[in-house]
Image (cartoon, rainbow, N blue to C red):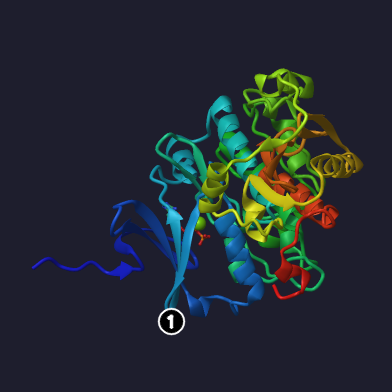
Amino acid sequence: MAVQRPRIGMYEVGRTLGEGRFAKVKLGKHKVTGASVAIKIIEKDSLQKVDKWVKREIACMKLIKHPHVVRVLEVLASKKNVYIILEYVEGGELYDKIVENGKLDENEARRYFQQLIHGVDYCHSRGVYHRDLKPENILLDAKDNIKISDFGLSALSQQRRDDGLFHTTCGTPSYVAPEVMDEKGYEGAPADLWSCGVILYVLLAGSLPFNGSSPSNLYQKMQKSVMDFPPDFPVGPRELIKRLLDPNPKCENEWFQVGCKATTKEDDLDVYFRKDYFMTECSRPVLMNAFDIISMLSRGLDLSGLFLEKDAWKKETKFTSVHPAEEILSKIEDFAVGLGYKVKILNFKMRIQSSKPGRKGYLSMATEVMEVAPSLFMVDMHKTSGDTLEFRDFHQQLSRGLKDIVWKSEEELTGRS
Ligand code: ATP
Ligand code: MG
């Protein structure tokens, strides 16, 4: 008779992948798809009270999707344990690579470091901080790319006080910023960048930048940023490391930029308007036929028409209005221009573009007004480039700005919804 493997949710539990200070990590296999996952098992007793804030943090972790950050797939719980189901990363720890091969070649270190910074920067933009970055938490996938593990997990073992700063000391002394060791409280972002500086040093030197005869001696050296570079340490990144191990770090550094993919260039509004899409002039919005409407409804479009909160994470939004198409467009235009966006309108189509590049280049949106029925228009707006969160912010502001022209269902007007 086949022996039944222990199961957690839909996952069969396999061998232990590793063990840290707070958790055991086991290999898991999805019962149906056979996909491998890593299951991080944390005893509830070792956690501080799982309050609302921690739950919020877990919800944020699930939204983190970046090629260089380990995905949190699910969080399950039993009476005794919390199980964090993670993307399985098969290439082992970056730490082992340094232990086995010693320091890395400059180009290899730069590639890892660029990936590390991109992952860290992405999480910070989503309000998630690591606070325990170290080579053990940096895993390598099958293609030798970095996957940062444990992002946001430190939230489980520490608390933010009323001043918004983190207070419980966590992290690993040599990689932890002096302000983390301080009792004063610290902000997540500078602390993580400090750790990135230490990691870059370790990758290039094969040893730690700060060494102390005692913890207090180590702390003093870190506070004063007293460190030496070995004679064969490459010159290019020294300045960057000094800046990262400085209270106000910035990453606009020549050494860092080498081999980095350029961010999206501004896409020219005029070029866009030259496309066939806009070739023929027309005097009224496109009229949607019954088939278009039914197919949209079947994809979940609710014609009661408000910008829905559930749309907030999507790259597209739709709403309906009984105001004339020209008025809808000019209201959106006034609003977008007021926020400093550039706007072009032609044939009931509109292109809106930010005047400054954002996190993923210029935020650009295409909007079209279509006629659903006589005097009922549907406005479709979707992101064509740029960052989804920036789109979400724009969309949220717009939904407030256009309150008067967005069609409200009777239920909403009578306050029943
Ligand atoms: P700490 O307790 O300070 O966090 P740690 O990071 O080494 O130390 P864990 O995060 O519990 O401890 O992880 C233990 C080990 O499990 C890791 O070092 C790694 O080798 C392995 N591991 C963790 N996450 C994954 C994953 N997603 N895929 C594959 N292996 C993993
Ligand atoms: Mg870890």
Q: Residue 392 in the image: state x and y as whole percent.
A: 71, 50
- Residue occupying the point 57% across, 42% down: 207
In the rendered image, the quadrant that contains the N terminus is bottom left
Q: Position of residue 319 (x, y in %)?
A: 70, 51
Of the pair 321 and 88, the residue shown nearer to us: 321
Name the residue nearer the viewer: 261 or 108: 261
- Of the 4 image quadrants, the one containing the C terminus is bottom right
Q: Position of residue 75 (x, y in %)?
A: 48, 66
Tell me the crowding category of disc 1: few under 14, some 14 to 19, or many 20 or more residues within 10 angstroms, Cα based.
few
Relative placement, left or right, of 187 versus 92 is right
Q: Residue visible at 61% across and 60% down?
A: 60
Q: Which residue is mark 1?
A: 79
- Spot the residue most to the left: 1
Q: Amino acid at mark 1?
A: Lys
- Residue in front for this viewpoint, 136 or 28: 28
Res 365 → quadrant? top right
Q: Position of residue 103 (x, y in %)?
A: 53, 34
- Residue at disc 1, secondary structure: loop
| Residue found at the far front of this picture | 374
Q: Do we see residue 64 in this rendering? A: yes
In this rendering, the answer to whether 62 lies above or below 82 is above
Horizontal arrangement in the rendering, residue 83 relative to residue 361 (left or right)? left
In depth, the one of 14 and 237 nearer the eye is 14
Q: Residue at x 66, y 71 (%)?
A: 53
Numbered disc total? 1
